[in-house]
Amino acid sequence: MDYMDEHILSLKNKLNHDAASNNVNTNLSQADVPDQDNSVAEQNRVLRMGDELIPLEWKTILDGQMAVSIPKFFSLMPLEQARFKYPSEQRPQIIYTSLDGTVNITFNPTESALEVDELLEFVEQMADVLRSVQPIRNWIGTEMIVNPSGLAIGLIRFVAAGVDVNLYNEMLLFVHEGQVTMGTFNCMESDMEAWLPVAENTVQSLHIVPSPSDSTFEKGVAFL
């Protein structure tokens, strides 16, 4: 579709900073997901990584409209660190990072309007953009999935050169309220196999929060 080319171009600058970088943050609310979401929540309290059990915690994103399960020891990247890691104003809005800052989960709403049935075409065009702007070391591929909550997500996976090491990147593209939201998971390529369960959990746990007014949230907000 002709108008889709404009959406791709409007996101190209963001991709330079989102996909092969290592951090981010701005307007975000975080909270435990209410027990009413048992169908998804009960499956995402602990995650096995090799011989370890990693405790998970629900966070709300996108003004509390969606929720995602991430490792409990992940935290929002401090403002100064985010500005250092992402000097461009095109930095992603939301970033959770591991204790050592080497593993990151980000979310970035965009103003690009899209219908769900156009997502596949959009993902393939975004993949072409990534191949043209990123220092790709290993192109893994694209995939369309529908997670347990019924959310359609386009995935783009690749390894790109970072400042000092190669980084494994997994980009998530989904439609929320008629607009594209981009998520990313990244870690060092050498740690990729260990952290893939966390990337998979991020994708599978994403879901719309039915109604924040149905229960009480304990929220924290950070701004860039």
Image (cartoon, helix red, strand yellow):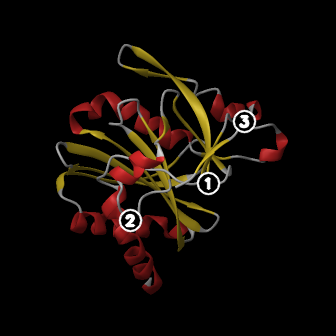
Q: Which of marks 2 and 1 is nearer the N terminus?
A: 2
Would you name the residue on which mark 2 appears? 14
Instruction: Specify the farthest residue to the front.
Output: 80
What residue do we see at 62% from left, 54% from top?
Answer: 62
Look at the image and tell me whether residue 129 can be seen.
yes
The kind of residue on which mark 3 rests is Glu
Location of the N terminus by quadrant is bottom left
Distance between the alpha carbons at the discs numbered 2 and 1: 18 Å
Choose between 168 and 82: the one closer to the eye.
82
Picture layout, residue 124 above or below residue 190: below
Secondary structure beneath label 1: loop
Q: Do the residues labelled 2 and 1 touch (CB within 8 Å)?
A: no
What residue do we see at 28% from left, 68% from top?
Answer: 128
Q: Which of marks 3 and 1 is nearer the N terminus?
A: 1
Q: Which of marks 3 and 1 is in front?
A: 3
Would you name the residue on which mark 3 appears? 218
Q: Where is residue 224 in the image (x, y as percent from the top left)?
A: 52, 55
Picture layout, residue 163 above or below residue 14: above
Distance between the alpha carbons at the discs numbered 3 and 1: 15 Å
Secondary structure beneath label 2: helix
What residue do we see at 64% from left, 34% from top?
Answer: 40
Picture layout, residue 153 above or below residue 15: above
Would you name the residue on which mark 1 appears? 62
